[in-house]
Amino acid sequence: AQARIAQALAGERASEVERRLVEAQFERFFALFPDLMCISRVDGHLLRVNAAWSDLLGWSAAELLARPFIDFVHPEDAARTREEFARLAAGAASVEFEDRWCRRDGGWLTLGWKAATLPGEGLVLAVGRDISATRAHERALTDAKEAAESATHAKAQFLATMSHEIRTPMNGVIGMTQVLLTTALDAEQRGMMETIHRSGRALLDILNDILDYSKITEGAIDIRNAAFAPHHLVEDVVATLRPQAAAKGLALVVQIAADVPGALIGDVGRLRQILCNLLGNALKFTHQGGATVSLAALDATATGARRYRFSIVDTGIGISRQDRHKLFQDFSQIDATNTRRYGGTGLGLAICKRLVAMMGGTIAVDGDEGRGSTFSFAVPMATAPAAPAEDGVASLPPQRPLRILVVEDNRTNQLVVKAMLAQHGHTCQIASDGRAGVADFAAAKWDIVLMDVQMPVMDGLAATRRIRQIEQEEARQPVPIIALTAGVMDGERQACVQAGMVDLVPKPIIAEQLLATIARWAAVGG
């Protein structure tokens, strides 16, 4: 019996030694732990804190233990902290949360907490870490992101405003020269008018390049695929630039492979832009001979879409091999003498490269200095079941004059549009603001409405919505409303469509584009 008692006492002494050893280790760990550590009751009173509390917050242990710890928590965070301790009191094993604690000097620290209940004790063991720097960095990143987005928005708004302000007077210059060139002029007068017109179109090209570059760098351009006729695309581009070639005595040749389908699916507007840029460059840098525009079908891609290569081969000044890498760089020209001699922003080819990449294609250049050059790009496109009908003034019977309501506040723009329409046999009535336009629309029947967007009294969007409302109320056949706008950003285009407009003609107004758009919608409407 004595042996058993001695053995039991020895076991108790061993357990006591082990317990004291564990307690000593915990005390050492508690004291030396670099982050905040505490033991508290679930009702919010601290029982023990380690030395890190005083180091970090500046409060002594006595000051911390004398008050409910919620007194030190930021008022905006107190409710959340109480909720987490209520969860522990309700039986949750552990919680994680953040709150802000007051330093003795009046500052605030953001602390990240992990807290757990001690089984059977009714106590909470919590560990906290100062995450103020992390949260400050995150806030700085968020602020920087918001500032960048704000700057981007401001830049886009500035470009939209400048585009509108520049295009409005340009509409008078380009529009009036177009009208005057159709009148009786002597040779000297015609030459002067053609110079003014070419200069205006060159300024418009520069403006469009700057806007496109800005939209591409901001990711604001979308590729809009639709069925189109590739043969017509190539022929239209060549026809557009043929006068430029003829003025220099250059030949233009079109070669389209027999296996190119009659209809493909792609962004015909962007393809036309790329082709016009490449062919325009070819003619600019060619003084003898000419250029050949070709289209050929290549192999299929991994997705099954076949690739098609557009090529422009010229007999111009060519490009040295060491300079080829500069061609597709932003704002790049081969050399300063070419910049002075030929002009240009150095953005055209950079824009072409980015547009081709957005279509999933590639662009390349070949040739040597003094031997001409070849620019080509290949893009994947699916075959379309049928190509859409061609646009053009010819689709409108010339014997059918139209009654057109023009809603436009700018006097110069009124004169330009009225003259263009009158030369093609159309009659028009001018309304100087949206409210007057709505009244004129309600009082008569019209074949087409041409609507400016930015106007006093009532803007074009509001006027369009009101006209659509009148049509519904009076069971009228919807009349095509075409926007005439100096705003060419994508958001502005979408706003026009959402208001009820069917199409858009950008300013400066090009007579051929305006008349083709009117012809297309007149044919649809009647």
Image (cartoon, helix red, strand yellow):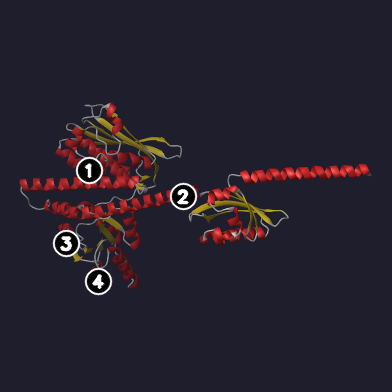
The label on residue 411 is: 3
Q: Nearer the viewer, mark 2 or mark 1?
A: 2
Is label 3 or label 4 in front? 3
Amino acid type, residue under disc 1 in the picture: Ala
Q: Earlier in the sequence, mark 2 or mark 1?
A: 2
Q: Quadrant of the C terminus?
A: bottom left
Q: Quick one: 516 or 283, which is closer to the camera?
A: 283
Secondary element type, mark 1: helix
- Left or right: 175 in relation to 454: left
Quick check: marks 2 and 4 in contact, CB under 8 Å? Answer: no
- Mark 2 touching mark 1, by CB under 8 A? no
Q: Secondary structure at mark 3?
A: helix
Checking the image for residue 439, the label placed there is: 4
Mark 1 vs mark 4, foreground winner is: 4
In the rendered image, residue 278, in percent from the top left (x then y), is placed at 26, 38
Q: Pointer 1: what residue?
A: 239
Three-letter residue code for mark 4? Ala
